[in-house]
Amino acid sequence: MNKLEQLLKDKVGTKPLFMCHLIAGYPTQKESIAISKALLNAGADILEIQIPFSDPMADGSSISVASREALERGASVKNSLSVVKSVSKGAASIVIMSYLNPVYRYGIAKFARDATKAGATALIIPDAPFDTEEGKELVAEAKKNGLCMIPVISPGVPHERLRELAQDARGFVYCTSRQGITGANGKFVADLKSYMQEVREVFSIPLGLGFGIQTPADAKKASKLADIVIAGSVFVNAIRQSKKGKTASAVKICAIRLFAR
């Protein structure tokens, strides 16, 4: 049982948990480390640190633009793992999110080893289904290195497919509130409650819910359906609207308001 699994075992059912998403190297490497620590200080239970990629298919404009800016400033897989290492020295549970291309080019086995050495507890690779050739390798290497593989599922996924994904899922399930991309649109799918109930019937691990969590009301609604509330674009927007040198404090204020525990 790694740090994430221990956290979930100890805390799920006692309070809503929050996973906060940020982009390694955005707006700069140094600031992304400060933002990570600010989110933890604001009460984040889990950090999802994204490795920037030039074609983030599941991300809306806020995260896509931020990823591109981070890459233009020299962000890389190696630098992103350095951010993880800097933040994971404390008690934080760190989940690395990436698309398959950067991981594949880095080397799947090497990536899993280095992610573990950096202090990560889990991987989210949304464009690498568990039963593809690369997905199978990722699952195997993650297991070998003590990492959880987090499946990402959306409304409309067939019941049989959920059962297939449940076989290799560890840690928690990342459920999206709608089909499509991340972003500021806070609209959830109409049958969200029944969708989450179906997922809970299939998986024996906790459920996270993300996409469109922008306000305390969104977070409160999500917390009634899932064990983990996931937010990301709202923090990117807070960074964009912050004054120079005030990014970390702006994100902390945003997080405190969003959690509203």
Image (cartoon, rainbow, N blue to C red):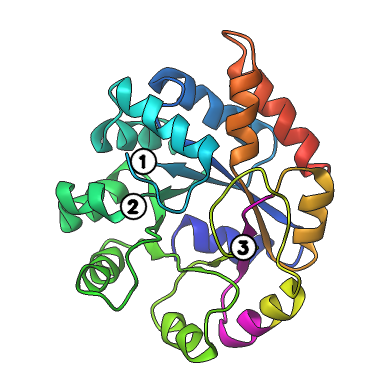
Residue topped by disc 3 = 208
Looking at the image, residue 130 lies above or below residue 174: below
Hey, what amino acid is under mark 3? Gly
Residue 94 x/y as whole percent: 47, 47
- Residue 128 seen in the current view: yes
**Residue depicted at 24% across the width and 35% down the height:** 78
| Residue drawn at the location 31% of the way across and 50% of the way down | 116
Q: Identify which amino acid the numbered label 1 is placed on.
A: Ile
As helix, strand or loop, the secondary structure at mark 3 comes to strand
Q: Amino acid at mark 2?
A: Tyr
Residue 90 visible in rendering: no
Magenta span includes 209: yes
Tell me the magenta residue range: 198-212
Discs 2, 1 touching: Cβ within 8 Å: yes
Left-right relation of 20 to 133: right
What separation in Å lies between label 2 and label 3 (alpha carbons)? 19 Å
What residue sits 73% from the left and 81% below the top?
Answer: 194
Q: Position of residue 81 (x, y in %)?
A: 31, 37
**Residue placed under numbered mark 1 in the picture:** 51
Residue farthest to the bottom?
A: 160
| Left or right position of 70 against 59 | left
Residue 194 shows which numbered tag?
Answer: none
Residue 163 is a magenta residue: no
Look at mark 2 in the image and give the residue it sits on. Answer: 99
State which tag comes first along the sequence, 2 or 1: 1
Where in the figure is residue 72, as x and y percent of width and height? 31, 23
In this view of the protein, which residue sits in the foreground, 149 or 61?
61
Residue lying at 67% horizontally and 78% vertically, measured from the top left: 195
